[in-house]
Amino acid sequence: MIIKLLGAGEYVAEQPGDTAPGHFGLAVKDYSHSTAPNRRYSDLATQRMLKAAMAGSPSPYSMEELDLLARRCTREEDAANKVERQVGKAAAALFLEGRIGQGFDAVVTGASAKGTWVRIFRPPVEGRLLEEFQGLDVGHRIRVQLVAVDVERGFIDFRKVATR
C-alpha cells in the first residue's frame, strides 16, 4: 500500500549544477539503478556515460538527447507496467472465477472518487468494492464477498460484508 501511495517513479536527466529529485525511498540525491530486465536501455545509456567519464571522454549524449531518452524510458516502462498489471488482473480474475460468493478478509488499499479498492489476503488479490464504501479509508480492515469477475477485462468485484 505504501509503494502504491508513493506513486510511480520516472527517469530524469540531471545536468551538472541542476537539482534532480534523487531517490525518495533511499533518501539520496545521487542515484542510478541497473540490472532490471525492463531497464536495459537506460542501463546501456548509463554504462556508456560511465565508460566515457572513466576514459576522460565527453558524454556520448547531449542534454537534449538525455532528456528525450529519460522521457521515452519513463513512457515505455509505464506502458510495460500497464500490460503487466492487466495480465496479472486477468490471471487473478481467472483464478477466482470459481469462488464467487465466498467471503474473504481484506484491507482497503485505495479510496478516491474513482472508487474504493480492497486487497484480499488469501490469495493476495486486489479488486473493487462495489457498494457500502462510505467512511472507509486506506488501511481499514473489512470482510468482503466476491460477487463477480470479468477475466477478459481483469475486473474483480467485491461487496462489503462487515467491518473488522
Image (cartoon, helix red, strand yellow):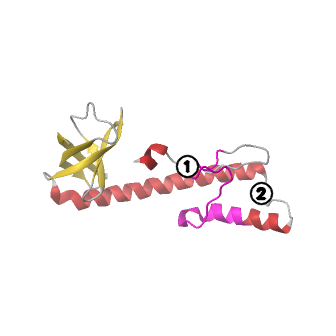
Q: Residue furthest left?
A: 101
* Viewer-nearest residue: 64 or 130: 130
- Residue ID at (51%, 52%): 78
- The image shows a total of numbered marks equal to 2
Residue 111, position as x, y percentages in the image:
34, 37
Q: State the residue at coordinates (79%, 61%).
A: 60
- The amino acid at mark 2 is Tyr
Q: Is 79 situated left or right of 111 in this image? A: right
Q: Is residue 83 magenta?
A: no
Which element is circle 1 on? loop
Tag 2's secondary structure? Answer: loop
Which one is nearer the viewer's eye here, 29 or 17?
29
Determine which residue is flagged by label 1: 9
> Where 136 sits versus 144, above or below?
above
Q: Which residues are magenta?
A: 21-47
Position of the C terminus, as image quadrant, is top left
What residue is pinned by disc 2?
Answer: 61
Specify few, some or many for label 2: CA neighbours under 10 Å numbering under 14, 14-19, or 20 or more: few
**Amino acid type of the residue tagged 1 in the rendering:** Gly
Q: How far across and down, in percent of the image, does residue 29 sit? A: 67, 49
Task: Tell us which disc is closer to us: 2 or 1.
Answer: 1
Identify the mark nearer the N-term, 2 or 1: 1
**Quarter assignment of residue 134:** top left
